[in-house]
Amino acid sequence: MRKKSATRRVAVLALPSVVAFDLTIATQVFGHEGQGRYTVTVCSLNGGAVRTTTSGLGLTVEAGIDALDDADTVLVPGFARGRAPERALAALARAHDRGARIASICTGAFALAQAGLLDGRRATTHWFHAAALAREHPLVEVDANALYIDEGQVLTSAGLAAGLDLCLYLVGRDHGQPAAIQRARHMVTPLHRAGGQAQFIPSGESAEDAELAGVTAWASANLHLPITVDDLARRGMRSTRTLHRDFQRRFGMSPRAWLIQQRLRAACALLEDSDISVDQVARRTGLGTATNLRAHFHRAFATTPTAYRRAFTP
């Protein structure tokens, strides 16, 4: 594999009937990064006009499929499901074989699977299409709940906004979490969202869901208290076992993991106020001590509360 330049080349492959939102996520994260760390080329089979899934909206791109030949990262946005052009699949396979990193957003995973890049690997896509991906590609271990999956050289993400999560993750992997935090700040988006896709799958809003919403609303308003899973179960008038099952169904995570995520989310908001000390942030979010806050923060974001504060305060 050739030696990578200081500036990483990102090629965004617009397949026929590309999802325009997915494509612009990649160009926004990498193309407007502002530090000269990336160059972005949007390409298609032959360049020129490309259809999108949005009625009345088309794209014109200058580069053809050859742009994949010298890219460090190839990103495939979602596209209208169906067999991707064979030239595109061959180009993806060549890029993979020479060591390029390949990533997909939403149904872009189908192109990666058709190129054989997901065989024997875990992968995800939009929850609505996950069953089809598993059925059409039985050698792929499909995780319908994950927002994104890193398998080393090949990465996949769920639909739409999960593509933003993945792209920010790639910035962090390339240049460290402070760079990803800074990029998230400029895009006015959280660096990491809690839970998986399960929280977005329509549930019919049953009575159980309404009761659970009451539990989570109470917990979110009282994060400064030493809330336990037992407290949540009592509040919801159910056993801890039933609560665990309900949280997995609704949020794709355990009650304890959800509670930690909410505390960290609140901590991030408080850290943006430089007048509040790290010790105060820990107490107000129920994490107790600055040491405990730092441990959870590093585990979740691979950075420190102080570094996060520097990135998010003028």
Image: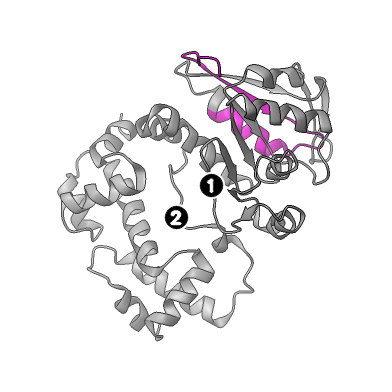
Indicate which disc residue 259 carries. Answer: none
Above or below, 95 relative to 143:
above
Neighbours of disc 2 within 10 Å: few (<14), some (14-19), many (20+): some
Tell me what residue is drawn at x 54 percent, y 26 percent: 30
**The disc labelled 1 sits on which kind of residue?**
Ile
- The residue lying toward the viewer, choosing from 108 and 30, is 108
Mark 1, residue position: 149
Tell me what residue is drawn at x 57 percent, y 22 percent: 72
Neighbours of disc 1 within 10 Å: few (<14), some (14-19), many (20+): some
Q: Position of residue 168 (x, y in %)?
A: 48, 36
Q: Position of residue 237 (x, y in %)?
A: 39, 86
Q: Quadrant of the N terminus?
A: top right
Q: How many marks?
A: 2
Q: Position of residue 16 (x, y in %)?
A: 82, 34
Q: Quadrant of the C terminus?
A: top left
- The residue lying toward the viewer, choosing from 188 and 231, is 231
**For the magenta stretch, what is the residue range?**
1-29
Mark 2, residue position: 194
Tell me what residue is drawn at x 65 percent, y 26 percent: 95
State the SS at label 2.
loop
Q: Earlier in the sequence, mark 2 or mark 1?
A: 1
Q: Position of residue 225 (x, y in %)?
A: 23, 67
- The residue lying toward the viewer, choosing from 165 and 205, is 165
Single out the mark in the foreground, 2 or 1: 1
Tell me what residue is drawn at x 73 percent, y 26 percent: 91
